Amino acid sequence: MKKIFSTMAFVLAMTTGLLAQNNFGIRAGYNLANQFVREGDHSATTKVASRFHVTGYYDVRISPGFSIQPGLSLEGKGAKSKIPEGTFIDKFLYLQVPVNFLGRVETRSGDFFYGGGPYLAYGVSAKVTSGNQGIDINWGSGVDELNPFDLGLGAMLGYRFMNGVVLSASSTAGLINISNTSTKYLNRVTSISVGYEFGRK
């Protein structure tokens, strides 16, 4: 019986210690969004559109040099196109779930982190604007609609200060065609973020 209680106490102490090292965080910032376009043997990249992101995440510390960071983001994506008729901006908004696997290098004032992982996103709004005019686009499977699902891979690096402030940069590349036509449109986003992790000491 004593061995059972000792084992339970040890497991509880280990669990409490691990949870104490985990932190909830939030980050927000600027997105540089564009699209990779491929039609047959021809490919091109659109111009960059200015978008934004807001992300809540939970950093699970597996070891001093490694953590897993699942999150939930409101992610602005899209692109800018210039043609003789004018400038058109795709403004897409996604609910996105990233999972990043991060290596960490501790310093006196905090730690550097680097890594990446997959993400899954679902479109919640879409609009094409030109000047002061805009047209809403529906999500669906029709040729005049957008595929609401986006799946891809991302990379991230940054620095986490001991006071909880986090600076980071990241890049994601979509792997799913968001168009329901033979022309492929793949999301690309580069982000700069400022955040804060609660519970850091």
Image (cartoon, grey):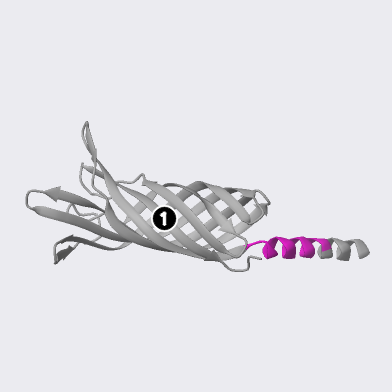
Is residue 15 inside the magenta stretch? yes
Q: What type of secondary structure mainly makes up the magenta span?
A: helix
Q: Which of 116 and 5 is in front in this view?
A: 116
**Residue at 26% over, 54% down:** 49
Whole-percent x and y of residue 177? 29, 46
Image quadrant holding the C terminus, namely: bottom right
Q: Can residue 1 be seen in this view?
A: no
**Residue at 87% over, 66% down:** 5
Q: What's the magenta region?
A: 10-22
Q: Which of 52 and 159 is in front in this view?
A: 159
Q: Which of 6 and 106 is in front in this view?
A: 106
Whole-percent x and y of residue 137? 20, 61
Left or right position of 182 against 100: left
* Mark 1 Cα shell of 10 Å, populated few (<14), some (14-19), many (≥20): some
Residue labelled with disc 1: 192
Name the amino acid type tagged 1: Ile
**Residue at 65% over, 51% down:** 107
Residue lying farthest bottom? 198
Residue lying farthest right? 2
Whole-percent x and y of residue 9? 83, 65
Left or right position of 156 against 94: right
